[in-house]
Image (spheres, rainbow, N blue to C red):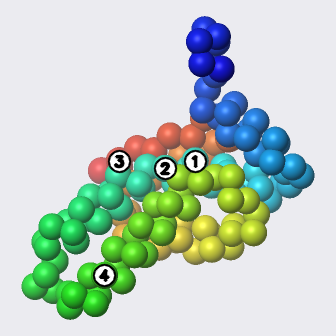
């Protein structure tokens, strides 16, 4: 759509992308919605990852533990950034959601449709 002057929302692009890929199930849409709801966790995860890379946690973790933590955080962020992965990974995403809410209780996902999810920091 470059140069056409038409501006589409990310949510429209997300739904269009899911529909273009073939049979979009209710589970696929639920997975995409859950990814959108959890977008607010990407920033604190990235901050944590950067802290690990800069050695902020060297005193508390072995190098192996740091390496595993960095790998897991990168995988989680990767999944959150790919809502088109679909229903196959919904169970895993729900487990990750519970973990993220435990790690970052100050970040709350607002429940909404695919189109309007936002995150807020609670006090």
User: Which label belongs to residue 39?
Assistant: 2
Q: x, y (%) of residue 87?
A: 76, 63
Judge whether 46 appears above or below 5 on screen: below
Q: Could you tell whether 113 is left or right of 82 in the image?
A: right
Which mark's residue is nearer the viewer, 4 or 3? 4
> Does 96 sit left or right of 23 as displayed?
left
Q: Position of residue 120 (x, y in %)?
A: 40, 44
Q: Which residue is mark 1?
A: 36
Q: CA distance from mark 4 to mark 1?
A: 27 Å
Q: Earlier in the sequence, mark 3 or mark 2?
A: 2
Label 4 sits on a secondary structure element that is helix
> What separation in Å lies between label 3 and label 2 (alpha carbons)?
13 Å
Q: Nearer the viewer, mark 2 or mark 4?
A: 4
Q: Is residue 102 in view from this perspective?
A: no
| Residue at 75% over, 69% down | 88
- Residue, disc 3: 121
Q: Reply above or below: 14 against 82.
A: above
Which one is closest to the eye, mark 1 or mark 3?
1
In the image, 92 versus 21, the foreground residue is 21
Q: Residue at x 64, y 42 (%)?
A: 112
- Identify residue for label 4: 67
- Real-space Cα separation, disc 4 to disc 3, in angstroms: 29 Å
Earlier-in-chain disc, 2 versus 4: 2
How far is the residue under mark 2 from the one under mark 1?
5 Å
Element marked by disc 2: helix
Residue 25, quarter of picture: bottom right
Which quadrant does the N terminus fall into? top right
């Amino acid at each position: 759509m470059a140069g056409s002057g038409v501006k589409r929302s990310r949510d429209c692009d997300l739904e269009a992308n899911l529909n273009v890929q073939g049979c979009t199930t209710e589970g696929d849409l639920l997975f995409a919605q859950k990814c959108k709801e959890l977008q607010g966790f990407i920033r604190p995860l990235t901050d944590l990852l950067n802290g690990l890379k800069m050695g902020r946690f060297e005193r508390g973790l072995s190098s192996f533990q740091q390496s595993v933590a960095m790998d897991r955080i990168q995988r989680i962020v990767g999944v959150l950034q790919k809502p088109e992965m679909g229903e196959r990974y919904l169970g895993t995403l729900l487990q990750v959601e519970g973990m993220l809410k435990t790690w970052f209780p100050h970040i709350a996902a607002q429940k909404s449709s695919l189109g309007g999810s936002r995150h807020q920091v609670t006090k």
